Image (cartoon, rainbow, N blue to C red):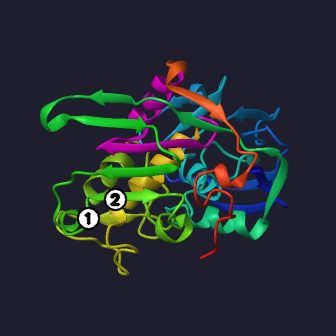
Amino acid sequence: MIAQRTLKTLTKAVGVGLHSGQRVELTLRPAAPDTGIVFRRVDLPEPVDIPVSAAAVSDTRLASTIANGGAKVHTIEHLMSACAGLGIDNLIVDITAEEVPILDGSAASFVYLIQSAGIELQKVPKRFIRLLKPVEVREGEGRHLKWARLEPYHGYKLSFEIEFDHPAVNATGQRVEFDLGQGQYAREIARARTFGFTRDVEMMRSHGLALGGGLDNAIVMDDVKVLNADGLRYADEFAKHKILDAMGDLYIVGKPLLAAYSAYRSGHALNNQLLRALLAQPESYDVVTFEHDGRAPKGFAQLALAW
């Protein structure tokens, strides 16, 4: 049986929010089968649970934000990506502020936290959303065109193409494909950092954003080059970070997908629109389990390898 997964024990991290610059403590706790992933704002007078779902997404500007009433959690996509990459189904995330800490700007720290806590198999089958027919969303046209698509696939594969007219990005791969059943998420995707331009960082800070951002948690570029002393972690790190983000955004649907995702210049907003379009077409998917490992897509029965 392909079983649901949670943590063996709790694990903690302390950091700052990318946009708020605010100190935040994060505690990842094991959760019972069929709990899903639930963020809990423990800093409020009465703690508020915010279950992750496509409908809970309240804002997609610069990051994915979920809300329950007035309680919000910003920038959940890197932690969600780590959960998707390691197959974590059930998790309680206690958080002491309204933004997940950025840590090193990738999902690597969250992967480390999860693997250090240990992964426990639960005696309940994992439920997958299996695509039965394509679903697509598009925005703009011509040079402003953006799109994202899900298609039937016996596994989980993502391909992403970016288009940045910048010397540092042009020198790298602008299209990446990753198959979760064949590749190693922790090694090939998780270390890809968020990126930005100095001019954008200055503009965002003038609006009270990116207050926690810097060279230690992002790739920063001026008009011609990468400013980080150590350069890039992957030759195609820019495109790989978009895969990382997409995995996190799509996992907000609440179950792992059996689908091929492809996108061109997509982002948090379009990814959430894609999930809502999927859920609005019940005939486009079904929910399946695998009682026998041999019937599951290749690689889904094994626990993710460490680094």
Q: Is residue 32 left or right of residue 292?
A: right
Q: Is residue 171 left or right of residue 130?
A: left
What residue range appears in magenta? 253-279
Of 266 and 24, which appears nearest the observer? 266
Of 89 and 258, which appears nearest the observer? 258
- For disc 2, the marked residue is 176
Q: Is residue 167 left or right of residue 218?
A: left
Q: Quadrant of residue 60?
A: top left
At a point 76% along the width and 42% down the height, the residue shown is 43
The answer to whether marks 2 and 1 mark residues whose Cβ atoms lie closer than 8 Å is yes
- For disc 1, the marked residue is 173
Residue 245 drawn at (x, y percent): 46, 50
Residue 199 drawn at (x, y percent): 25, 55
Q: Which mark is residue 121?
A: none
* CA distance separating discs 2 and 1: 7 Å
Quadrant location of the C terminus? Answer: bottom right
Local packing at callout 2 (Cα closer than 10 Å; few below 14, some 14-19, many 20+) is some
- Type of residue at label 2? Val
Q: Is residue 284 left or right of residue 171?
A: right
- Type of residue at label 1? Gly
Is the residue 255 above or below the residue 184 in the image?
Answer: above
* Secondary element at image label 2: strand
Is the residue 38 above or below the residue 158 in the image?
Answer: above
